[in-house]
Image: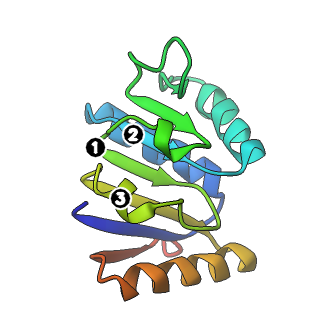
Amino acid sequence: MQQIDFHFNVGSRLQYACLFVRKVWRMGKSVAVWSSDSARLADFNRRLWAFDDLSFVPHAMAGSQDAQEARVVLSEDPSRLPDSDVLLLLDESVPPDFEQLFRRFDRVVDIVSSVPEETAAARARYKIYRKLNCPLKAYDQGSR
């Protein structure tokens, strides 16, 4: 892992994540998406199908028949995610064994909306990463 990027103050976390994944996918890179929240991951899965009427981001759930071919793979279980260019975190906590997990990716991205509960959880994650001397970079999306 080279660094962890925090994209914060986004209007809608999942909508922003869709745009982010599309951008990375269009660059020819792969993305592994993790959340322990099955409802959030299912919502994100649905949004990837329909967030833009004029484009489509091929993606699959880890373990599905299409997962081996897809450059965008989603999972509740981080151990089932393929090694990818980017690990996208859509959760309120750090992944289990995150230090080991993060080594498999060049970039880790954590998206945070302006919802107070999400912001507080993100600050806690940031402190954990900082304590371990993870390279961190923050991008304020609120001014866009």
Q: Which mark is residue 85?
A: 1
Please tell me whether mark 1 sits on a helix, a strand or a loop.
loop
Q: Amino acid at mark 3?
A: Gln
- Tags 1 and 3 in contact by the CB under 8 Å rule? no
Q: Which mark is residue 31?
A: 2
Figure check: 126 above or below 12? below
Residue located 62% across and 57% down the image:
13
Q: Earlier in the sequence, mark 1 or mark 2?
A: 2
Residue located 52% across and 11% down the image:
65
Please tell me whether mark 3 sits on a helix, a strand or a loop.
helix
Q: Nearer the viewer, mark 1 or mark 3?
A: 3
- Residue 81 image position (x, y, % from top left): 45, 38
Q: Earlier in the sequence, mark 1 or mark 3?
A: 1
Q: How many marks?
A: 3
Q: Amino acid at mark 2?
A: Val
Residue 129 quadrant: bottom left
Task: Describe the colour scheme in one phrase.
Answer: rainbow
Residue located 54% across and 66% down the image:
94
- Residue 97 image position (x, y, % from top left): 46, 61
Disc 1 to disc 2, how far (Cα)?
6 Å
* Residue bearing the label numbered 3: 100
Q: Is residue 58 left or right of residue 120?
A: left
In this view, the residue in front, 30 or 14, is: 30
Which residue appears farthest toward the top when viewing the image? 65
